[in-house]
Image: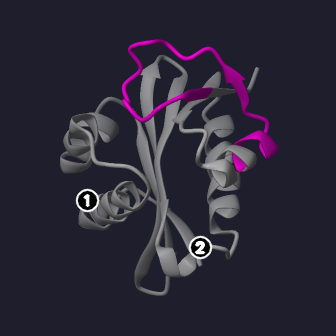
Amino acid sequence: MEIITWDPKFSQDFKNMNLQWLKEFFWVEKHDEEVLGNPEKYIIKPGGMILFVKEENEIIACVALMKMEKSVFELTKMAVKPRYRGEKIGNKLLDFTLSYAKERQWEKLIIYSNRKLENAIHLYRKYGFREIPIEANNPYARGDIKMQLNFS
């Protein structure tokens, strides 16, 4: 298993994993369709990154880091293929993601999530994310919790 950075050839894997996850737990919103349909435009070109977990020749997980401000990024679009869940891949990906952010001297990461995702919320808390007030006009209709991890 290895963690690799963005390569356009994996854009369909990124889109498919996230669409599958969204349909399994929620629904696909307009914002999701835009970002997943054009990750270069919405994530990469503004200064963000997409990381993938690769097992042999298969992409099995991903996470995006979307630039919000100068050194503030949203941790978003994290997905693990169903057959690989329960293998601590989310932990490994989150470990790598936090190291990646620290190396770049980012100030903080933001996550929008939903309280029904108890395992995800537990994982974020375990890594030091703390709940902060969520704005009424947050980018996700399904979002009912906002969390933040400060690096400085």
In the rendering, at what x and y percent does residue 146 appear? 58, 26
Residue shown at the point (74%, 26%) measured from the top left: 151
What amino acid is labelled 2 in the image? Arg
Residue shown at the point (66%, 26%) measured from the top left: 148
Q: Which quadrant holds the N terminus? A: bottom right
In the rendering, at what x and y percent does residue 84 appear? 56, 78
| Magenta stretch prevailing secondary structure | loop
Would you say the residues marked 1 and 2 are in contact, meaning their CB atoms lie under 8 Å apart?
Answer: no
Q: Which comes sooner in the sequence, label 1 or label 2?
A: 1
Q: Quadrant of residue 7?
A: bottom left
Kindly identify which numbered label has been placed on residue 135: none
Q: Quadrant of residue 10?
A: bottom left
Position of 68 compared to 37: left or right? right
In the rendering, at what x and y percent does residue 41 appear? 21, 37
Neighbour class for label 1 at 10 Å: few (<14), some, many (≥20)?
Answer: few
Q: Residue 72 colored magenta?
A: no
Kindly identify which numbered label has been placed on residue 8: 1
What amino acid is labelled 1 in the image? Pro
Kindly identify which numbered label has been placed on residue 85: 2
- Please indicate, yes or no, whether residue 83 appears anywhere in the rendered image: yes
Q: Quadrant of residue 106?
A: top right
| Foreground residue among 33 and 62 | 33
